[in-house]
Image (tube, coloured by chain):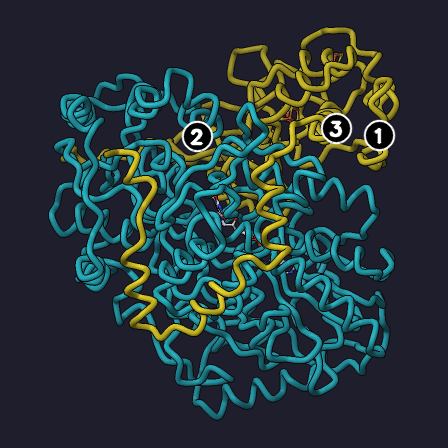
Amino acid sequence: MEIINGYPDYMRESINEVVKTRQARLKKTFTPMTMDERKQVLDKFHPDYKAEGKRSLAIGPNKGKVTLSEVADLLEAHPIISPKDINLSQIDYDVDVLIIGGGGAGTVAALWASNNGTPVDKILIVTKLRHGDSNSMMAQGGIQAADRPQDSPVKHYLDTYGGGHFSNKPELVRRLVTEAPSIIRWHVTRGVLYDRDENGDFMELSGGGTSRDRLHAAKDYTGMEILRCLRDVSRNRKIPVLEFTSVVELLTDGDRVTGAVLYNMENEQYSIIRARATILATGGFGRLHVQNFATTNHYGATADGLVLAYHVGATLRDMDTAQYHPTGAAYPEQLVGLLITEKVRGMGAQPLNIDGKTFVFPLEPRDVEAAAFIRECYGRKKGMVTSTGMSGIWLDSPMIEILRGEGAIEKNLGAMHRMFQRFGIDMRKDPVLVFPTLHYQNGGVEIDVEALTSVEGLFAGGEVEGGVHGKNRLMGNSLLDYNVFGRAAGISASEYAKKTKPGKLSLKHLEKYEKSLKDAGIKTKRRAPILLPEYRGKEALSRSIDIDKVVYA
Amino acid sequence: MPDKVKTKMIRVHIMGKEHLVPEGLTIMKAMEYAGYRFIRGAGCRAGFCGACGTVYRLKGDYKLYFELACQSAAIDGMSLTQLPFVPANKATYTVRLIKETGNPILKFYPEVARCVSCNTCTKACPQQLEVMDYIQAALKNDIEKAAKLSFDCIQCGLCAIRCPAEIAQYHVGQLARRVYGKFVKKSNQLNKRLNETNKGKFNSELDELMKMDKAAIKQKYTERDLESLAKKK
Ligand SMILES: Cc1cc2nc3c(=O)[nH]c(=O)nc-3n(C[C@H](O)[C@H](O)[C@H](O)COP(=O)(O)OP(=O)(O)OC[C@H]3O[C@@H](n4cnc5c(N)ncnc54)[C@H](O)[C@@H]3O)c2cc1C
Ligand code: SF4
Ligand code: SF4
Ligand code: FES
């Protein structure tokens, strides 16, 4: 097998077809689907629409609600600690506001709790890996905010609500879209360097399902640029952070969350924290590899927050869906599953099948676009199949250089370009191969418009919460979500802490939980939260999804 | 469709100990295949967080190589170690209070003046940034250049561990970018929109949307005009 500029000869044949059709495609785009066409492709090809991938929960506040099996497995599992092993009489940390998770939402919540008057030494961020190791650091494409004259929060509302299949909580969507411009303002005053034109206005692009160009980007390092800047603010302010420490269980006084049990990932010691208010900012669940899909998520995205919240009786919502990003890398093997930002399509690259033909509008909402890719690969057998058995769709990145001028990729997509270049592929000259990858937890712990969960003393912001995006999130809305609801959670928790006294600490809810497992007849050795995925030995090899059997029968 | 290729096994030396792993894995996955479970040394697993800085040599080659374990392939005969943490002091500052006169970088990181232009940092950078150039720009108070050249820095710290002048380049870059943010032209569009939202300009339209029944709002959704489509026409 000869490799030419990163691609083996059998792939080169198909790339030649892509090149042949390119000129004609530059001026044409595929028509978007009607609502009926969308429904058809989703029903038949989207992993979420397969009944086998889900089940009814047997216990807890969401009993009877259909939930993704991988999540149900964790909710119908034993806690990892047992009340008798934990000494609650010695309090190691005593704070007003405890923040679980040092990603985007956690950092924003801490800053706003501090802005709201909670003393810095009465705030504590506890985080599994390092401060900043999170999905927030990885976002590439951008953050939505309707600030152009031809756009408005009303349009942003409609895009978000429709994109979510009209299942979002309207009051949360409203807060999301109306506060968006103020979030951008906050960022730029702290020094976040968004891409701008010569007038100082932002260079904005469309994302899947948006009706206006609304994505604010910082090259393709948007998430990193925002979070490293906010983290710098937090460090200057000396907000305390406990790194390599996970929360493994919340504590309650019976009704209200009053603290947490911490686990030091390095020395394996437990400690106890008492908190007047607690914020869940633990992010998503990509590392559960729902339906065996590869994922874009960071190492610690293991749904811990859902488990912690469910143990204390918090209601979840929309846990029957997962977001698969249409464009995860499908080649080379080392990059499988990693994100190719939507911005690549936003800037003009079209998705193509093995014959170099277009088959879908490039910017459908994510679930529709992903389902169309799966249909092309497995329904119509028009994917490019690699030597590891992965089937993929071409993303014609060289179009970007033609449409936007030479150098556009290096300038705007430096991270992508660098990633492929490390493996000998030049995306300015050759297309890249993609396939859907597990990307985002659409639902989560239900919150109200002030970021309060259904349990007193427990607030939530960011990917861990549910309701903002309904059953499908639009690109650029989750960076916005962690800012808007991270801020809401920080302020609400700070206010709540001012009005309340520290509570009693107990793990009684775990006894109740064990009893409900027993009553439901669940016999399992599983324990949750899992904290980190298991990748040792053969698990390190990339998953080959047997789509024909698993995803689409 | 190509034939499935049989995987070859290669030898990697992880902190001196030899392991057999399949060819074609990243260094990170090769270590996992060999039985390591990361607590430190893995974050994003995608080249964005800088948790996985790795140093290696190849057989019969005197050179030291610097890479991200999650973004480079394991090579037969390589001898590697991770450097998941770099001790470095971050200065404390309030960007708002930084004056436009003088060199703010030198004020907070006076050691930048010790740079001997040896270029070792540039050679160590797994992002292939012009690290020396951004440090030199910072030294000359060219904040814009320092901010732009350091923009793709993932703060892995590999440069800092190699620097004979003991500079923590990535902290310098962070300060430069934040200070540069002060000088960027403001967006009129954003200011205008903020005024409008403060005055409640969109409230009644949003009220209306929230009151609509599902059928009506679905209709409204399907009737949207798409800017990305209009441009193609
Ligand atoms: C590759 C990628 C690209 C993306 N691109 C975009 C984009 O362009 N635009 C957009 O809007 N969105 C994007 N997203 C989504 C967006 O980045 C995330 O949804 C959002 O940043 C989530 O923020 P968060 O703070 O809720 O979670 P995170 O940022 O993931 O933070 C959660 C933190 O909690 C920690 N944690 C987890 N469990 C525990 C525990 N038990 N104890 C202590 N700490 C714990 C985690 O380690 C992590 O540090 C992208 C996501 C990915 C993965
Ligand atoms: S400049 Fe230094 S810290 Fe930044 S990516 Fe390069 S080597 Fe890493
Ligand atoms: S390694 Fe240190 S001394 Fe050498 S060029 Fe870089 S910053 Fe200057
Ligand atoms: S793990 Fe984040 S850069 Fe490698």
Identity of the amino acid at label 2?
Answer: Met
Picture quadrant where residue B191 is located: top right
Q: Chain of mark 2?
A: A
| Three-letter residue code for mark 3 | Val
Percent of width and height locating residue A275: 79, 71
Point out the tag, 3 or 1, that comes first from the N-terminus. 1
* Tag shown at residue A416: 2
Q: Colour of chain B?
A: yellow
Q: Residue at x 50, y 47 (%)?
A: A146
- Horizontal side, residue A117 vs residue B206: left or right: right
Return the x and y of residue A281 as percentages of the image width and height: 62, 60
Can you tell which quarter of the image residue A472 is in?
bottom left
* Ligand 4 quarter of the rendering: top right
Q: Are marks 3 and 2 in contact (CB under 8 Å)?
A: no
Q: Where in the figure is residue A310, as x and y percent of width and height?
A: 56, 76
* Label 1 crowd bin: few (<14), some (14–19), many (20+), radius 10 Å: few
CA distance for labels 1 and 2:
34 Å
Rendered view: B31 above or below B139: below
Name the element at disc 2. helix
Q: Does the residue at mark 3 contact the one at mark 1 (Cβ under 8 Å)?
A: yes
Amino acid beneath label 1 = Ile
In the rendered structure, find residue B179 and report the number of the disc placed on it.
Answer: 3
Front residue of this view, candidates A113 and A99: A113
Image height of B57 relative to A314, above or below: above
For disc 3, the chain is B
Query: What colour denotes chain A?
Result: cyan
